[in-house]
Image: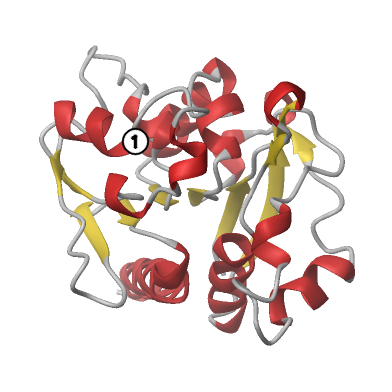
Amino acid sequence: MAKVMAVLSSGYADEENNYVTGWWAEELFAPVLALQEEGHTVGLASPKGGKPVVDPLSLSEDYDPEGKYKKLYESGIADKTTPIVDVKASDYDAIFIVGGHGAMFDLAHNEDLHAIINIVYGLGGIVAAVCHGPAPLVYTKLPNGRGILEGLNVTGYPNSMEPKEVRGLLPFSLEDELRKIANYKAETNEKEYVVWGSDQILTGRDPQSSPQFGKELAKKLTSIEKKEEEKFFD
């Protein structure tokens, strides 16, 4: 079974504009469920450690009508995270970055996270991100100075889907930044959209794509494990 590290925003608050955000519930729980179904284990990390702030909208009836993700959140399974600085990256086969607007604020330029991404990637592991989760990948440079997403097919939350009330509050446009370095696609005509930029890079467009994103990541990790087992027994 593979070990996966899920990285969440610790949360962000703009009191002047009465704006609170953090990680998005479905974008953590849907992939975790898919990974666990394949027998993989998932650890949690955030910049500050402890209990990270969930975006309250992601637990509302509008975005979680059946209350599935709210129930998982209230169970406390996301209450304890390891500070990013304390994560031993070499222990993990993959890292996936959970979306939510919080990722734009405290994950995008987090150098400790960039270092972890580089270690996982350098050891041949998978680097994955969903929705606003690609924000830190925009600024992650490989040891050779090349951007980790440079020239790859990628997706992420598109400008056309951003709520008007938050556009002026975000530090940058994820789509605009991705377009500068990669082959960005939104495929908004598709209900779900995920794309492998390479054998090691997976991105998903939005919350609705989270289940498929999780399945793709889980299946890839299972496939890698099977190949390694076959080599061992040859």
- Where residue 48 sits, quadrant-wise, is top right
Secondary structure, mark 1, is: helix
Q: Position of residue 80 (x, y in %)?
A: 86, 48
Task: Name the residue that disc number 1 marks.
Answer: 174
Q: Identify the residue at image location x=79%, y=57%.
A: 78
Q: 74 above or below 83? A: below
Q: Position of residue 53 (x, y in %)?
A: 77, 44
Colour convention: secondary structure
Labels in figure, total: 1
Identify the image quadrant of the C terminus: bottom left
Q: Nearer the viewer, residue 58 or 6?
A: 58
Q: Residues within 10 Å of mark 1 (few under 14, many from 20)?
A: many
Which residue ends up furthest to the bottom in the rendered image? 66
Q: Nearer the viewer, residue 155 or 166?
A: 166
Q: Identify the residue at image location x=67%, y=43%.
A: 22
Q: Nearer the viewer, residue 112 or 78?
A: 78
- Where residue 205 sits, quadrant-wise, is bottom left
Q: Position of residue 109 (x, y in %)?
A: 49, 19
Q: Is residue 8 left or right of residue 174?
A: right
- Where residue 182 sits, quadrant-wise, is top left
Q: Is residue 173 left or right of residue 155?
A: right
Q: Identify the residue at image location x=89%, y=71%.
A: 75
Q: Is residue 172 left or right of residue 57?
A: left
Identify the image quadrant of the N terminus: bottom right
Badge 1 amino acid? Leu
Q: Position of residue 49 (x, y in %)?
A: 81, 34
Q: Identify the residue at image location x=16%, y=52%.
A: 185
